[in-house]
Image (cartoon, rainbow, N blue to C red):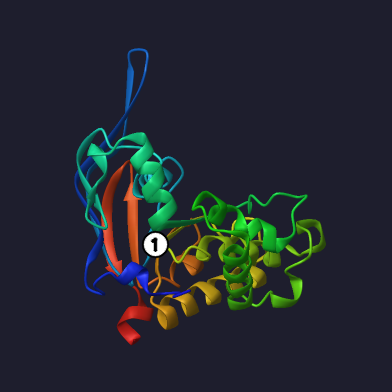
Amino acid sequence: MAFGANGGMDIKMDIINMTNISKLYKTGVIQVDALKNINFKVVNGEFVSIMGPSGSGKSTLLNLVGCLDKPSGGSYELAGHKVEKLTDSKMSEIRNEFLGFVFQNFHLLPNLSAQKNVEIPLIYRGLNAKARKELSEKSLELVGLKDRMHHLPSQLSGGQQQRVAIARALAGSPALILADEPTGALDSKTGNKIMELFTELNENSGITIVQVTHEEDIAAYGSRILRLVDGEIVSDAETNRRKNG
């Protein structure tokens, strides 16, 4: 298992390349421009935070990045794949192959152990039981939960549950991890520990991370902060972490 290998991709490759992206939602005669003229690139190995007030379009943008939806206009290339031209089945395949997802509320199955929860995306990849066990154990060890792998979610703290969710995202060695408010359900101390883990994975293993957050201190763990207002990018700037690095 090659964590951080990013699928053998060129370290300087644009893993995300959005050009003039728009997203429209229509309800009857009402049209909402959720995203307007978005131009957004992420180079392999970056850690980007997306910020904005409620309704700014940040979750819509993350859904497009994660191939959970298609843009209404513009062009989006994910690791060289033109997303707007893909079939739904191909989008699903790319999500499984290239992406790892981390959500605010963990989304763990309560009747499965930490290890079995981590194995779930590996089942969809068609891996056999031995391979799934090896990869899930290594992933849980990487996030510091080797001694908790047989515990149920109810036997774990919130921070530990989020670590299981991160291990699940890592298990398939994705090129890109997408995190939607990953600290939103955690207290500040635990949230900072999760962000320290993300920073370690990014800096030491070269894993590309894009997160959505509404918290300035959480966003500052990234090397760039992209700010959205009313569906448009109003700033895209390096953080002190990048400048001091």
Which quadrant of the figure has residue 23? top left
How many marks overall? 1
**Residue 56 appears in the picture as rendered:** no
* Residue depicted at x 38% and y 77%: 206
Q: Is residue 72 above or below residue 56?
A: above
Secondary structure of the residue carrying tag 1 is strand
- The reply, left or right, for residue 33 in relation to residue 149 is left
State the image coordinates of residue 113 (x, y, percent, origin top left).
74, 59
State the image coordinates of residue 83 (x, y, percent, origin top left).
27, 44
Q: Is residue 219 above or below residue 81?
A: below
Amino acid type at circle 1 is: Leu
Query: Where, quadrant-wise, is the C terminus in this rendering?
Result: bottom left
**Residue 221 appears in the picture as rendered:** yes
* Residue depicted at x 57% and y 66%: 131
Residue positioned most to the top: 28
Residue pointed to by mark 1: 176
- The reply, left or right, for residue 109 in relation to residue 194 is right
State the image coordinates of residue 6 (x, y, percent, origin top left).
36, 69
* Residue depicted at x 34% and y 67%: 7
- The reply, left or right, for residue 222 in relation to residue 73 is right
Which one is nearer the viewer's eye here, 111 or 220? 111
Which quadrant of the figure has residue 89? top left
Which one is nearer the viewer's eye here, 130 or 63? 130
Q: Is residue 42 above or below residue 2?
A: above
Which one is nearer the viewer's eye here, 62 or 205? 205
Binning the other alpha carbons within 10 Å of mark 1 as few (below 14), some (14 to 19) or many (20 upward) gives: many
State the image coordinates of residue 154 (x, y, percent, origin top left).
80, 57
